[in-house]
Image (spheres, rainbow, N blue to C red):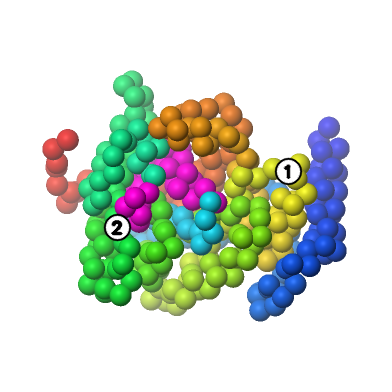
Amino acid sequence: MGAVAAASAAGTLQDSAERVASRWFALKGVFDHAAPEHPVPPANPGAVPGGIQPARPNETQAPLLVVFSLAGGVGKTSLVATLGRAFSSMGERVLLTDTTSHGLLPFYFGARELRSGVVRTFSPPSGSTDAPIHLVSFDVDGRSADSVAQQQIADAIFGSGPGNNRILLDLSPNATWLVGKIANLHPTVLVPVSPDMNSVISLQAVEKLFQSAADDEGRSPQPFYVLNQFDASLALHLDVREVFRRQIGERLLPFVIRRSPAVSEALAEGMTVVDYAPDAPVSQDYLDIASWLRSVSPPASASFRNVRWSER
């Protein structure tokens, strides 16, 4: 059965490549100035694409995961919330940072109101061994021209990290000025993309945005991409995957987040999908991505020195 499945997958990829070459006339010229096409790597979900290992200055500094997209409706916030929940189930204390004060992120954890600029703690049900989740939202709209306010927000975001194993930043298009302030933190950048033309066309703009930011040694973050709401039975979705593979090679993750109504149903119940439908295939997709991220960017060793005690 394994050989048959492998042959079927290879045939599907070949068919997809032929369709892209023959009928995606809408893409002609879109990538005229893009980097050369990359070969498709062998599927190995446990491997680190390209052998890339984001650097960290020391083991006690919480690694930064930035989730960003220019295209709307790609599941960026649900990815941040569900990855945070997945890390929590693996024992990590995570800080989720939302750069949209009116965003939905707190509602995945049972919140009933929004509070800007306040670090909130969401605890698992009684008896659970999962780690609590910390969350803070900042209103960054209108700060693009105010350098003082920008620095204050950046200091607040990254100053909230001590005591946590990881920081997840839900970066909105209105807060792209933060990109230049995070390069020296050597973030891992993850871009969710939908299998549609909107995400394909936005690819170059995303690449240019992160290429414009460099650390003190001249290195720029290289985003990874993950296909969300993917349906392998649809030819269009297979075509889009092939286009991304040609353009970014191994930086397109070898696994996807499958399309499932359970993700939006979970939010309506004030949960992430890994709590709402833990046995659903899409829940395993999120857990697989969290495991991969831990392999390329291990959690910090929690250190509580120089951290004030606080009242809960």
Residue 177 image position (x, y, % from top left)? 37, 70
- Is 238 above or below relative to 231? below
The boundaries of the magenta stretch are 74-103
Q: Please tell me which residue is depicted at 68% across the width and 72% down the height of the picture.
A: 30
- Is 265 above or below relative to 26? above
Q: Is residue 287 found left or right of 308 in the rendered image? A: right
**Label 1 amino acid?**
Ala
Instruction: Depth check: give the residue in front, 68 or 251.
Output: 68
Label located before the other in sequence (2 or 1): 2
Q: Quadrant of the C terminus?
A: top left
Q: Please tell me which residue is depicted at 58% across the width and 34% down the height of the picture.
A: 261
Badge 1 element: loop
Q: Residues within 10 Å of mark 2 (few under 14, many from 20)?
A: some
Q: Please tell me which residue is depicted at 65% across the width and 45% down the height of the picture.
A: 230
Disc 2 and disc 1: Cα gap in Å? Answer: 38 Å
Q: Is residue 28 found left or right of 33 in the rendered image? A: right
Q: What residue is disc 2 on?
A: 139
Badge 2 element: loop
Instruction: Depth check: give the residue in front, 6 or 194.
Output: 194
Q: Quadrant of residue 216?
A: bottom left
Q: What residue is disc 1 on?
A: 232
Whether pointer 2 and pointer 1 mark residues with C-beta atoms closer than 8 Å, the reply is no
Residue 36 image position (x, y, % from top left)? 70, 74
